[in-house]
Amino acid sequence: MSEDLRAALAALGAPPPAGRAATSDLSVDESLLLHGAGFEPADLVSGVSIQSIPFGSFGAVVGQREPVELAAATEAVTGAFRASAERLRAECAAAGGAGVVGVDVELGIGRLAVQVSLCGTAVRPLGARRPGGVRPFVTDLSVQDYVLLARAGFEPVDLVSGASLVAAPLRSLRQLVAQAGQNVELDNLTRALQDARERAMERLQRSALGAGATGVVDVSILDAPLGHARHVLAFVCYGTALRLAAERPRRLEPELVLPLDDPARAFEARSLRTAR
Amino acid sequence: MTEPSRTARTGAWSSALSTNDFAATRAMGLQPLAFVQGCSVVSWGFLGAGAPGARGYYEQFPCPHGFVSADHRLYGYNYEQTWLEEAWFGGLRAAYDRLLDEARRYEAHGVIGVSARVERLAAPPAVEFSLSGTAVALEGSAAPGAPFTTFLAGQKLRKLVEAGFAPVAIAVGFASVGVLASCVTEYQLRGVGTVTYGAAPVGEIDQLVRAHTQARALARERVRDQLGGDVLHAARLVVREVEAAGGPQVEAELRGNRVRRFKDVEPLPPPRPVVRLVDR
Amino acid sequence: MAAEPGRLPADLPADAGRRLAELERGLFTSDLSVNEFLLVKEAGFHPLGFVMGSSIYHIGLQARRWGRSQELTKLTSAMYEARELAMNRMEEEADALGADGVVGVRLDVNYYEFGSDAAEFIAMGTAIRAEDGRSYRNVAGKPFTSDLSGQAFWTLLRVGHVPLGLVMGTCVYHIAHRGLSQSLSQLGRNVELPNYTQALYDARELAMTRMQDEANRLEASGVVEVKLVEKSHTWGSHTIEFLALGTAVAAAPGAPPPPTPQSVISLDL
């Protein structure tokens, strides 16, 4: 090890190599795995999209009795995903990458705008530029997942999303709940929210189909009322669409191992109790 | 700056390394010398910076409407806040130089496990930079021209070197883009303005998207300028929006480790997948 | 086998029909992680799609005696009903896809601002089908459900067992408030609270017994990964729901003997 370090320090004295500098947000483990799979990082790339939501979308609607989908707000969410992925792809292409891995997805739904920020590392085959005309892939999967999937014969295609934002008329709903018998199901309400979830999933599926994928894996699901408008329920799901690269999926055949180590024990100085 | 009262060659050293990192550091043949730091507080003023757009990124967003009133802007614009960036870089440079000075006093070969804290102070408007790390020396080796610096320490540093990369320096880039909203942008951002629309505009808020995209690109360019031909490793990009009078200000900060390849390394053999019979 | 898209059970939304039809044509979706996805395939199953079911239930309190510890049977049945409805709808979607089972099932409860008495019960999971064409459906003829992760599912099959279904038992118990004189007489002393102790014991027993009964109905040999959860939902601290949840399993006929795992010590800190 010291030999390596000596050589490393000696290299600091020499002039730096020529060429365009590569940047990446990968850790050493990820870079090594990537290298083993025949790829190298090209550049750190990002894509942002901010879509506006019409003013008053999240306000109460007079006379509304049933939960209703907010079409414009919903379109803003999926539009933001699409546009930011497009920009990410463009930066990747400019850097000569074959695709972007480990994309960090940040989604914010504000009162008047939806923002999606994507940031990841563009990768290219070792020592080459990507072949022209091939659309770069975008995936939120880590390098480990990407390499595992490649071993199994799958490749990522795109980051796809689906959403449905639903406004529930609080006052009428509270009355509905109060008037309903004790301990019974509230059919209409159930139906409306089920619809919203199914719609969001279906839109995700449709965009996966549109990208020519066979499946979507590791879907992240957001299912919560908005912080600033608690009567609006946001159902958003996104994930990586995949397709089979090989003729058929390959088996990995993992081994079963029994680790003989215990998790570290924490010792609390204040008491004689050792806590795990 | 005053001389540090702790001396290196006599007495015990201190460091911010965790036990694991310390063990890995010693196993590499590196001897910790001292905990070193550098700090600086800067404020900025835009007197003498010239009009927005005199230098740096500047983009106009004209009003698409026919009429103009006293309240209705003819155009909005995005502008790079070069005075802010210069003050920022000046402060970072000062703190970094002080860190290196302290390291040199201990005759260190490098500083590992650097932590860089950047904090905005509210009043007076200023930014505080505190850098700290552990100065180390490689036993039986001569010091390089300038001490190397890296955010990494312990296992991660060891793996970096084993992978054939030498740490050169930490690299930090910063860009700040202010937005003076055009009438359209103002309406989209605030829902009110001097314009009303029959059908509200839905779609991208171009001006803000451009500001975000530019801020990131500029931060990356600044870091790339610091790299020479070297590579940036384990970078982290943080973007913040700060509210100000005319509109939001978008700040992007990119930090990472500048590393240089010093030997070629064979690719790893494909790892074996295992399923561990242990509960998390 | 798979139901025709136009003839879904009446309590599933129309959108589900379209979505499931798309899944039938070969697209799969799931919130399994990549590791889980690959292990499910290793086990000889293919993920079909993400399935879910939900039900919004009014869970108001029923009258109860202040001073007596007792099960609130109406509430117990309501909580059970609500979860059953959600799970059944999820199973129906899995059925419509022609699935053998559902893994990674999550049962969640969402509280909204509709009023403190209503809650939404949600069941979600990934439907899977065996690639060798054998049927893995349980004795009730329905796809098995389980909250086993992809890793646990693979490990279970490797040791020659199959999941039969998610079994649950629930019990909503009201714990008597201690009388005033009782409280005063015990002030300042270290003493067991017999009310609480007995009530908690009884309630847990009821929940576990009911769960075990469900497992017996499925002709299981055992239940794995039992979780006993206590929640007060919206009722205050003296009314608690005890939910026992586990996966019923049985030995697979003709399974090979379980493999010997290799022992390792990991050197990462």
Image (spheres, helix red, strand yellow):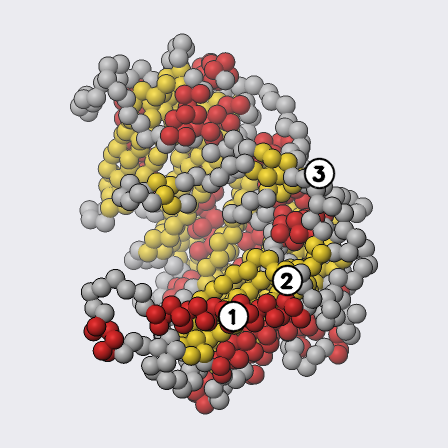
Tell me the residue that label 3 is attached to: A131
- Please, what secondary structure does the residue beneath circle 3 have? loop
- Residue B142 in view (yes/no): yes
Tell me the residue that label 1 is attached to: C207
Q: The disc numbered 3 marks a residue on which chain?
A: A
Residue at 78% x, 74% y is C4
Q: Position of residue B27 (x, y in %)?
A: 44, 20
Q: Quadrant of residue B126?
A: top left
Quadrant of the drawing holding the N terminus of chain C: bottom right
Query: Few, some or many C-alpha atoms within 10 Å of disc 2 (few <14, some 14-19, many ≥20)?
Result: many
Residue A266 or residue B7, whichever sits in front: A266
Residue at 61% x, 70% y is C213
Amino acid type, mark 1: Ala
| Label 2, label 1: how far apart the Cα atoms are | 15 Å
- Please, what secondary structure does the residue beneath circle 1 have? helix
Residue B133 or residue B47, whichever sits in front: B133
| Label 3, label 2: how far apart the Cα atoms are | 52 Å
Q: Does residue B22 lie above or below C172 as drawn?
A: above
Count the marks: 3
Amino acid type, mark 3: Pro
In the figure, is residue C122 to the left or right of B147?
right
Q: Which mark is residue C248?
A: 2
Residue at 37% x, 53% y is B241
Residue at 79% x, 47% y is A248
| Label 1, label 3: how far apart the Cα atoms are | 62 Å
- Please, what secondary structure does the residue beneath circle 2 have? strand
Q: Position of residue C56 (x, y in %)?
A: 53, 78
Q: Position of residue B58 (x, y in %)?
A: 41, 47
Residue C81 or residue A91, whichever sits in front: C81
